[in-house]
Amino acid sequence: MLASAAEVLDATDNPAAALTLTGVACTFVSKDAPDQRYTAVQDVDLRVGAGEFVSVVGPTGCGKSTLLNVAAGLLAPSLGSVQVFGEPLVGLNRRAGYMFQTESLMPWRTALANVSAGLEFRGTPLKEAQALAQEWLGRVGLSGFGDRYPHQMSGGMRKRASLAQTLVLDPDIILMDEPFSALDIQTRQLMENEVLQLWQAKRKAVLFITHDLDEAIAMSDRVVVMSAGPASHPMGEFVIDIARPRDVAEIKSTPRFRELHAGIWDVLREEVLKGYQQQLQKVA
Ligand SMILES: Nc1ncnc2c1ncn2[C@@H]1O[C@H](COP(=O)(O)OP(=O)(O)OP(=O)(O)O)[C@@H](O)[C@H]1O
Ligand SMILES: [Mg+2]
């Protein structure tokens, strides 16, 4: 069911949006040929209510990570504006924690030291930072692994440590870029459920990027579909009216899940095909 603007407002029902992107465009200029420009995203309006879990899905290369970088304050948009809890964003978004698409653990630090690093950089006394980091390692199921270095951990364990690294800072907004895409399906479902439990307890605003429509529906209050690039923009917004708490594996077999999936896939399918064609053309 495609949500009307009014339904979307009802569903988020919170005037103090945690994150608002208005009319955002990002144009990249080629270093080698400055006259060559590529507008990855354009006319992007996106809102995440306080405590809301919003997923963005779209074809590869459409600009999902770009939007997250804009939300994090790592990339200034070429056009448009970003507001964080009603204030214009200037520089880094200090109310946001970012879980990157790529591995973000420091290889020279243990799991514990990776998780405590952000707190240490903030000036938290070392003992306190380590105690909090230990607590978070426990919450993500890594209690006994604090002294392991990233290369001594499995992919799933590294993702857990990255999650703890992000959440230990207690951000009001959590930005996650395909955090589980490299994981096997079982580990992935376990982690999705764990993230939902952690989120349910604290109810932070989440902007979650994924390729995986099942994952987007299972996790979110709302799913935003991006068009294929260039000038990618939201082209559909769907309220996920499935009760919580949810078990991501179980809800996939419910009629409502399948109905939502069919409705969203209807919009997404064509964009994925366009995105795929463009990738082929780039390679050719
Ligand atoms: N710094 C940059 N300079 C030039 N082009 C860029 C830059 N960052 C991104 N792009 C281009 O912008 C487009 C969007 O990239 P982005 O990484 O945001 O896509 P994405 O949707 O996250 O893709 P994926 O699903 O594969 O992770 C791509 O065509 C990419 O090549
Ligand atoms: Mg990306």
Image: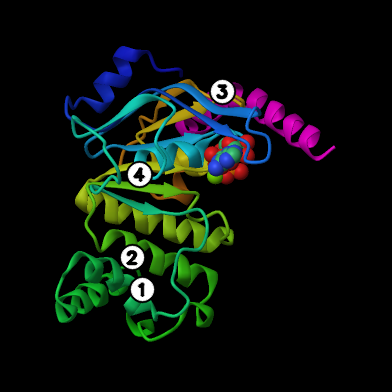
| The residue stretch that appears in magenta | 255-284
**Which residue is the site of mark 4?**
72
**Residue 179 lies in magenta, yes or no?**
no
Numbered mark located on residue 165 in the image: 2
The alpha-carbon separation of the residues under discs 1 and 2 comes to 7 Å
| Spatial separation of the CA atoms under disc 1 and disc 3 | 37 Å
User: What amino acid does circle 4 point to?
Assistant: Ala
Counting labels gives 4
Depth order, front residue of 162/214: 162
Secondary structure at badge 3 equals loop
Q: How far is disc 3 from disc 2 in space, using C-alphas?
A: 33 Å
Q: Give the number of the disc on residue 69.
A: none
Tell me whether the residue at label 1 lies in contact with that at label 2, contact meaning CB atoms closer than 8 angstroms: yes
Query: Real-space Cα distance between discs 3 and 4?
Result: 20 Å
Q: Of marks 4 and 1, which one's residue comes earlier in the chain? A: 4
Closer to the N terminus: mark 3 or mark 4?
4
Say few, some or many: other residues with alpha carbon within 10 Å of mark 1 (under 14 / 14 to 19 / 20 or more).
many
Q: Which residue is mark 1?
A: 114
- Kindly check if marks 1 and 3 are in contact, taking CB atoms under 8 A apart as contact: no
Mark yes or no: residue 253 visible. no
Q: Is mark 4 within 8 Å of ligand 1?
A: no
Alpha carbons under labels 4 and 1: distance apart: 20 Å
| Foreground disc of the pair 3, 2 | 3
Residue hosting label 3: 231
Q: Is residue 136 left or right of residue 282?
A: left
Amino acid type of the residue tagged 2 in the rendering: Gln
Quadrant containing ligand 2: top right
Tell me which numbered mark, 1 or 3, is placed earlier along the sequence.
Answer: 1
Q: Tell me: residue 124, above or below residue 38.
A: below
Secondary structure type for disc 4: helix
Q: Magenta includes 280?
A: yes
Q: Position of residue 5 (x, y in %)?
A: 34, 14
